[in-house]
Amino acid sequence: MEHRQAAGNQTLKQIARDLNLSLMSVSRALHGQKGVSEETRRRVLEHARHVHYRPNLAARTLVRRRAQVLGVIFPSLGQTFWADIVRSIEQVAKANGYTVLFAHAGDRAEVEREEIHTLLARQVDALLVASSDPEGNIDVLRQVHGSDRPLVLFDRYAEGLNAPGVFCDDRDGARRATEHLIGLGYRRVVHLAGPANLSVARDRRRGYEDAMRAAGLPERVVECGFGEEAGRQGMRDLLEAGVEVEAVFAAHDPVAFGVMDVVSERGLRIPEDVALVGFTDVDHARHLAVPLTVMAQPTAEMGEATARLALDLLAGRVPPDTRIVLPARLIVRASCGAQRRAQEASGG
Amino acid sequence: MEHRQAAGNQTLKQIARDLNLSLMSVSRALHGQKGVSEETRRRVLEHARHVHYRPNLAARTLVRRRAQVLGVIFPSLGQTFWADIVRSIEQVAKANGYTVLFAHAGDRAEVEREEIHTLLARQVDALLVASSDPEGNIDVLRQVHGSDRPLVLFDRYAEGLNAPGVFCDDRDGARRATEHLIGLGYRRVVHLAGPANLSVARDRRRGYEDAMRAAGLPERVVECGFGEEAGRQGMRDLLEAGVEVEAVFAAHDPVAFGVMDVVSERGLRIPEDVALVGFTDVDHARHLAVPLTVMAQPTAEMGEATARLALDLLAGRVPPDTRIVLPARLIVRASCGAQRRAQEASGG
DNA sequence: TTGAAAGCGGTACCAT
DNA sequence: ATGGTACCGCTTTCAA
């Protein structure tokens, strides 16, 4: 009953014994190194395949001091944004002979600290992190950055930590999103901002302010967080305070969903009564009651760049403070009212 | 510059040297084992904390032969369904002192085989897998099942492999979904079925057939796959073949999205012209143009049960062929037309 | 209470 | 071309 035996229980030593060879010949044969006769190599490979030999990675990692693994930490599972990035990181890593160990922090800073340490304890070669709280965890991040394994930040950076990383140009994106609304003729453009401890939220807010200031329009910002409930709360506060709102620039798509809820519960319509632009481009945007206009980050490119940067740092091919910034892309759908205007214009 | 030193570079031996102790005293102190004086323990703990000592998990795993890790394989990133399950698996695992290593197969059977072997090579204690192709990979799965590390299947099973696992009662769910449509008065109920190599797809089809047969209605099934594009194709084929369609039971939510596309591109409406029910309950269903009625799997419960089953198997607390089947839940929204009928009824 | 030593399964470097 | 051996950092067993 061959398959009753323990999986991967075969060791080099065992194979060597089976074949009356030294452990070293087996190792060499398996690694395609020279120093073994063709005959021996054939026998070894054949036997290894037959017994389903798999090297014990713990042993290899122990002696090599590196697991040949990129450790990736991201804030949360279940958002396509992160899934897309992680997927492309993995693709590049695999193509270069590395495997990837993911860990997500569930948006909790303490969990993130723990995950970072666990990955390091597993001897990952480099750490790629999109931190749930870059400044709150700056001590750990700094510690990693000061260590012998490269730290690559992605999506969000920590003020005061000069680590390499890959980011989206959130400020520019936010400015352009806001300009888009202003260009459509809206004057009362409000920004629902994300949590101030995240660089992405701060930068988007700055971009909004840049655009409003340049247009000579009054700024109005509510800081509400990044979630759907936060969006509802923020929008309710705004309306209850009697603020005139022609258009909303939401710092994140889920926030925009919250806005949708509140708008419709008041019997108002998007974009006729309130225009709306989000940030990130969630899944199924096409099938929404009102398809959402968004600034989309280039997720695939960000993931690729992140992985490549890590590999380049490992190989010493780039300076240790390399930062890569990629532009966001405006996707115009119905929620901003642009299509309606275009129709009106052409229709009469 | 303390933080310039290598992260986790400290070893037991080093600490022992620093403190003029034997490696063993340090180890015992760190593990809270008895056999060390309080004084020694204090010194060790203090020093360890100071130098940020972290045990090298590769070394520990090597000697223990187990990584104290549950390996989890799931088909694809970026669907909330999997994210939810994985999240709850992790929660239970952590609460019981295990960590989790995820790997996703990108829906590709060969990738899955590779990931299974990699996880085993990393000495995971048990393997939890939702296979991309249970029957196609039955040889590997059987091999794992015959090994000394428990295999727990979840969501989909392999015909011909008596492995323990946690599943949703797809057949029953599909039957109830179909009955729901029949109960609303639809006679021409069509099923867009998923790929026949997946137990979930087969079972849902059977459930549909059960319901139609019991109602004495003619069955009509198109096997189209599980994706959005598949749904579009299936629906187009159906309409172009001139089939009368009053209601569609889609085997998976993405398929239902495809149906929505085709229906609206023909100028028809949901549910007035075609009623629709999906399976799985995707994110943001509430904000869709036509909120989707679905059979939802109990994701959190499935994840918990899967993790618990693995732990129970490891502890020898349950028979090695334990299977757990959980019921699906109908969520009625607009797409099936139930709400419209209710309104009509009460309205006059 | 404390320490020495063997060994987990590989790899690297030395001999033969 | 082949084999011997010393590690990697930790746990386990046994001795002091």
Image (cartoon, coloured by chain):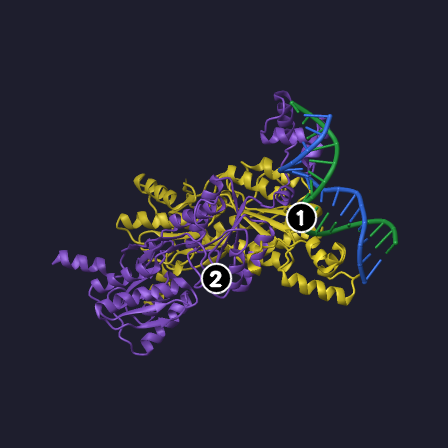
Chain colours: A yellow, B purple, C green, D blue
Number of numbered discs on residues? 2
Front position in the image: A330 or B23: B23
**Looking at the image, which residue is at 11% across and 59% down?**
B348
Q: Is residue A136 visible?
A: yes
In the picture provided, is A114 more to the left or to the right than C9?
A: left
Q: In the image, what residue occupies the spot 21% across and 59% down?
A: B340
Q: Residue A225 at x, y = what percent? A: 42, 42
Residue at horizontal 61%, vertical 58%?
A94
> In the image, which disc is placed on residue A59?
1
Residues B53 and B29: in front is: B29
Please report, as a chain letter, where disc 1 is located. A
Chain letter, disc 2 residue: B
The three-letter code of the residue at mark 2 reads Ser
Q: Residues within 10 Å of mark 2 (few under 14, many from 20)?
A: many
Residue B301 location in percent, x, y? 38, 48
Residue B158 at x, y = what percent?
Answer: 44, 62
Q: Quadrant of residue B213?
A: bottom left
Report the front residue among B338 and B40. Answer: B40
Q: Which residue is mark 2?
A: B132
- Secondary structure found at label 2: loop
Q: Secondary structure at mark 1?
A: helix
Q: Residues within 10 Å of mark 1 (few under 14, many from 20)?
A: some
Q: Quadrant of residue B339?
A: bottom left
Amino acid type at image mark 1: Ala
The CA distance from mark 2 to mark 1 is 30 Å
Identity of the residue furthest to the top in this view: B39
In this view, the mark in front (2 or 1): 1
From what the image shows, is residue B184 above or below residue B124? below
A334 above or below B316?
below
